[in-house]
Amino acid sequence: MKIALASGQEASMIDDAESVIDLLNQQGADVILEMELAEALSSPGTSLDDIDAEVLAIVGSDRTVLNMLLKMGESTIPILPVLSRGQPDFFFDVTVGNFELVVEDLLSGEWTEDRRSRLSVTIGETPTPPILNELAIFAKRNATLIRYSLFLDGEEFWKDGSDGLIVATPTGSTAYSLSVGGPVILSPASVFSVIPVSSTNPARRPLILSDSISIEIRDLTSPVMVEVILDGQMRLNVDSGPIFIRRAQSDAIFVKLSEERIAALRGKLQKKTDILEDLAQDLPPSAKLVLKVLEYQDKLTHRQIIEETMLPARTVRHALSILMSEGLVKKQLSLRDSRRGLFMAVKPSER
């Protein structure tokens, strides 16, 4: 069986990728390395566009997976995310530590395809790669209002002024969308959610729409440049629009192991629910948003947190002080600049 392998470029992720390669080789798999990983290991590699394999295993964090999917575009190779050590573990079932337990299932075909709907986005006349989680529209300067018109199937639904707008898939409903009050959507529901962020109109509420409906953002204005953020990874400047959003023709396909195997690996859903319930009781919304972004983005500086959350600097400082006092976030010095700190979420097992 041909198994392609890609990873993030951090040294720890490359080391973990080597461990996965060793396990696959021991089981007689035909391993194909993605070009960047191959270069890091001084081995022959294949570009993502040319990979021909039954499965693509991606070693790293959820950010690694989202980045790789954006690079893959319309490719429908089944994806197996493999969590690297020390990374936030909400997005993954399989980790480097338990990979040996699933190798036999993987190579013997004891798995099914888990299809996840994606967003197809066109900004003006420029298409973007398919998006797994969400499209976010914000002004580039923090706490700056944007105004827009929302059209559904060609008819105007509302005009609004808000800090931003998020359109999320069911997969993305537990990511950025959740932090700003969006609904949790259980896959494989054929819907999208549209969430205005801090609207000036208190009557504005998140929408749940059939994914057969076309969404269009028109008349987009702001005192500063507006940007579209794709899956938290890619940022594109946008003028007045329009922005067209549809369900992508190609779904993302993930490897789905048997229920018995997943149950043996982790109780992820219950753990995540318990953590979120505890946070909802004890933390202000700004602190919950900062924590979610750190879980989602790994290590960030104070300035980067401001950019990702769109919160004022003072609010971010207050949120970080709360999170560190609760033992939910820790700070380490940046190796590049000792005057700057890097903030990261503390894993549940370390709390």
Image (spheres, grey):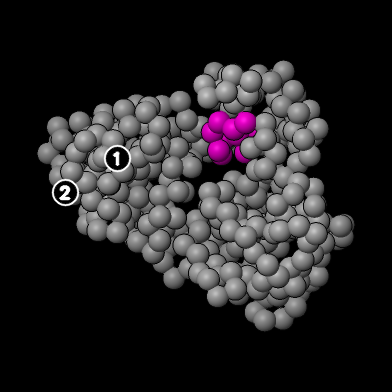
Decide if residue 97 is on the left or right side of residue 52. Answer: right
Q: Which mark is residue 1?
A: 2
Point 33% across, 32% down: residue: 14
**Magenta residue span:** 291-301
Where is residue 175 drawn, in percent x and y? 59, 46
- Name the disc covering residue 37, or none: 1
Q: Is residue 342 above or below residue 239?
A: above
The local secondary structure at tag 1 comes to: helix
Prevailing secondary structure of the magenta residues: helix
- The answer, for residue 47, to whether it is visible in the render is yes
Residue furthest left in the image: 28
Left or right of 177 on screen, residue 350: left
Q: Is residue 181 visible?
A: no
Q: Nearer the viewer, residue 227 or 292?
A: 227
**What residue do we see at 37% from left, 28% from top?**
11
Q: Is residue 122 above or below residue 314?
A: below
Closer to the camera, 128 or 20?
A: 128
Total marks shown come to 2
Residue at 54 percent of width and 61 percent of height: 189
